[in-house]
Amino acid sequence: MGFDPSFSSRQFKSVGTRPLRPDGIDKVTGRARYGADFNMPGQLVGRVLRSPHAHARIKSIDTSKAEALKGVKAVITAADLPDMTAGDAALHSILENCMARTKAFYDGHAVAAVAAVDARTAREALKLIEVDYEVLPHVTDVDEAMKPDAPLLHENVFTEGVDPRPSKPSNVAKRSQYGHGDVQAGFREADIVIERSYKTEQTHQGYIEPHACVASVNADGTGDLWVCTQGHFVYRDQCARLLGMDISKLRVTSSEIGGGFGGKTHVWAEPVALALSRKAGRPVKLVMSREEVFRASGPTSATSIDVKIGARKDGTITAASATLRYTCGPWYGMWAELGAMTAFACYGLASVQTVGYEVLVNRPKTAAYRAPSAPMAAFAVESAVDELAGKLGMDPVEFRIRNAAREGTRSSYGPVYGPIGIGPTLEAVREHPHMQVPLGKNQGRGMACGFWFNFGGQTCTDINIGVDGTVTLAVGTIDVGGSRASLSLVVAEELGIPYSQVKAVVADTGTLGYNDMTDGSRGTFSSSMAAISAARNAIEIMRHRAAAMWDIPADDVVWEDGQARAKGENHGNLPALSLKEIAAAAPNTGGPIAGHSELVADGAGVSFATHICDVEVDPETGSTRVVRYTVVQDAGKAVHPTYVEGQYQGGAAQGIGWALNEEYIYGKDGRLQNPGFLDYRIPVCSDLPMIGTQILEIPNPNHPYGVRGVGETSIVPPLAAIANAVSNAAGVRMTHIPMSPPRILAALEAEQAG
Amino acid sequence: MMSGIAVSTTINGDEVEFLCQAEETLLEVLRDRLGMTGAKEGCGTGDCGACSVIVDDRLVCSCLVLGAEAEGRRIDTIEGMADGDKLHPLQQKFIEHAALQCGICTPGFLMAAKDLLAKNPDPTEEEIRFGLAGNLCRCTGYDKIVRAVQDAASVMKGA
C-alpha cells in the first residue's frame, strides 16, 4: 500500500541500542524447544538405512523381514514415494537425495526407512532390511571427475552452457561465464602477470543441533510437521510437492533452531518422516545422528580454482580471470556459478572473466553454507592478489585500495554498484591499531577482502496491538541468531514505543503468509522492511481511530513519538492520545488494531568486509595458532550492534576452522572416514583468540533505515586472510585449504628441498 | 525381554525413580523418560559437550553415562541452575553478553562454566578457554562466551 522502502536519514531511539534478547531466558534455562525437544502422543521412532557404498546400483530391496518384526509399524523405500524421474529436475533431485531410487550416489545415501515403537526396535529393523547392491566405480575428487574416462554418475547429463551441446554425457553439469572487457588484451598491457592454482577441501556447516522433526499425517491428507529449519514455509511447500499433498493442509511449525548456516535450507529427513507417518498412521519422530549429519547432510563444495591476474607497475590491475570447478555432489547446483560471480566482486576491473564448472561427484549433495561458494573463490583470488602486491613491491592494503570497486563500478558479475563498503573497510583496516602490533617469532600477518550479494525475497509480517497497548510482532523468517530482538527494536522505533512493549514471535505456516527462508543474510533486512511497512499500516489505522475519538478529520492527525497528535489551530487544545489509549478504546472504535505487510524485499545492499589476521606457525609441527584477529565489515545500519558483532565473530571462527582444520576425508573406497566431531575438528574455545570487530555503517539506499544483511560476508575473507598470514609466517605460499599441520610441514620441506 | 532396570537417584535436589534399559544413556533417560530436554544431543560420542551435566560434583557428558549408573548419585542439570525465578549469575551474564546465538550449546556451556568456577573461582582467560574446550559452539566464535564467564566470575566473587 504505497510503502516506500528508500532510505531516509533519521535520529534513532531504539535501533542501534543493545537490549536483552526476548528468547534469552528460555535458552539459558533449558526451556527453549529445539527440533528434538518436541513429542506427540503415540509417536513412533524413525530410523534411516543408508548406503555403505559411494556408488552402487540398487538391484533390489527386501523389507519383508523388517516388516515382520514386532513393533515395526512402517517400512518405506523409494517405491513408497512418488516417482518424479520424468518431472521437474530440481524436485526430482531433492526427492532422490531424500531416498535413493535406482542408484546410491554416495556413502550415506538413504535407501530405506523404518518407523517402530522404540529406538531399539527401529535399529533392529534396519539390520533386517536386505539391499542387493551392484557396486559401481566411484569418483570423489573434483578434477578426477572432470576427466573423460571418469566414472559417470548419470547417463543423461550433458554439459549445459556449452555450444554446441556435447555429444557424450559427463560429470560436468554446467558451464557458466561472467565478466566484461577483453582479458587477453588486458594481460598484454600488464607488466606482471601471476597465474596460480588452488584447492579447497569440502567442509560441513557443523551446526551443533542435528536435523530433527516430528511428522504427523492424517488419513484425510492433512498433516503437521514440527522441525528445525531455516525456512518452514519452504519446507512446507517442498514436502507437499514431493509427497503430493495440498500445501495448505500441511502445517509446519519451526522449532528453535540449533544452528543452520545454510544447512537447514534443504529438506532431507522431513519428507521421509512424513511418508513414514502417512504409512504408519501415527506421528513419527526422526532425528539424525551426528554421523548421519556428516555423511548425508550439508557439505559445501570441494574446489579446484585457477586464477590469473595482471597488473602494471603502478599497481593497476589490467585484467583478471579465473576458472572455478566446484563439486555439487550427485546433482546439479549453481555452486561454481556463485563462485564465478563473487570471485572478483571486490574490484573495479576493466577486463575480467570467470568460468565456473558444476562437477558431479559421489559425495553428499552440496548444500548452502554461509555465503555459499564465495569463501573458496575469495581464497584463490585474495591469495593471488596478495602475491601480486608483493611482486609489485606494494603494501597489500594499498594495492587493494587502488583497485577496489566503488560506487558506479560495473561489478565482475554484471550490475553496477551503488554506495558500497569495500573502500571504507580497507581504509579502516589501514588505520586499525591491529596493523601496528609488533609480530613475534614465527608470526605473520595477513589480510583479505570478501563480498556477498545479500538477498531480500518474499516476506510477510503481522503486527497486532493488544488492548493493553503491547504489541505482538509475528514474523515468518526463522530467528537464527537474535533477529527477534532486532525486529522488535525496529517495531519499537517505528511505533515510537519502548522495546519492552514489543513481543516478537516466529509464526507457523498456518497463521502467516508465505516467507522465503532465512538465508542470504535476509532475516533482519527483509523482515525489518516488512515490519516497518506493517507498523506504518498500523499507525495509519491508529491515526483514524484517534481522529474518530476526537471527531476530527484523519488528515488532521499525525503520529509522533508513539502518540497521535492533532495538528492545526482548530485542535490546538486536544491532548495527545498515546498508543496505549488508542488501543484501550479499540473495541469501541472499530475493533482490533493490526498492521500487515506482504512484500518482496528488493534491494538488499551488497556487503563487503576486510579481515586482518596474525598467526604463529610452529616450524617443527606445522601447526598454526591464530594469535590476533580483526573483522571490519559494513552493516549498512547495525540494528542490534551486539548481535552484528556476533555474526562477524561467528563467521570468522567458522572461516578459521575451514582454513586450518576442517575437511571431509574420503578413503579409496569412497567412504567418509571422519564423520564425527572428534575427527572432523571444528574450532574449540582454546583454539581461538578474542575476535575484534569494527562495524561500518554505509546506508543501504533501498532500506528505510539503511540496513544491509550482515550474516554471511564474515566467512568470506578468513580463508585467504589466514593463508596470507601463514604464508608470511612460514615463508611458503600455501595453496591448499585446509592448511593442516601435514600440509604446512610438506610445504616447508618442499621449500627447503628447493 | 523388555525388563527394565529400576534406578533411584537425585536430580536437582529431587528424588527421582525411573526404569531404563541397560543400553540407555543418562542423556536418553533425562530427555526421553523424564522430559528434561535441557541437555542436548549434539553428537552422542562425548565430543560436543551439549549434554553436559554434573554427577556428584563431576562434569560429564551425559551421553557417555548409562542411565543405570545414576543409581544413588546426585545429578545437576540445567533445569536446576536457576534458583526459582532468580537466574544464576552465569545465566544472567550469558544473556547480557549475547554469549549465545542459536543457544543449543548454551545449557552445556553453562554447566561446564559452573563446574569451572566451582573449582577455580578466579580463572584467567586461558584457563576459561581450556576449561570450556570440551564444549563446541558454532555460532559465536567463543569471544562473548569467555567475556560472560569472566563477568560472572567477578560478580560471584563479589557476592
Image: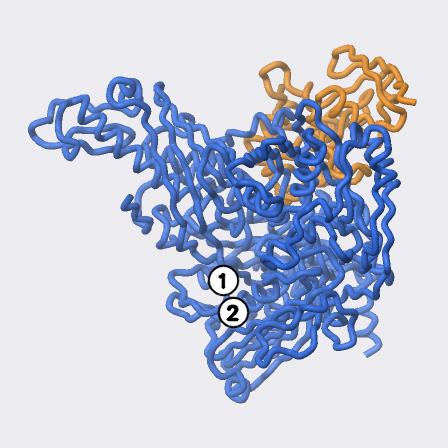
| Label 2 neighbour load within 10 Å: few <14, some 14-19, many 20+ | many
Which shade of the palette goes to chain B? orange
Q: Are marks 1 and 2 in one subunit?
A: yes
Of all chains in the rendering, the one displayed in blue is: A
In the displayed structure, B60 sits above or below A108; it is above
Three-letter amino acid code of the residue under disc 2: Arg
Determine whether label 1 and label 2 are within 8 Å by CB.
Answer: yes
Q: Position of residue A377 (x, y in %)?
A: 61, 66
In the displayed structure, A663 sits above or below A350; it is above
Number of marks drawn: 2
Assign the C terminus of chain A to one quadrant of the image.
bottom right
Q: Do we see residue A209 in this rendering?
A: no
Residue placed under numbered mark 2 in the picture? A400
In the rendered structure, the residue with mark 1 lies on which chain?
A: A
The residue at 59%/59% (across/down) is: A717
Residue placed under numbered mark 1 in the picture? A426
View extreme (top): residue: B15
Q: Is residue A429 left or right of residue A41?
A: left
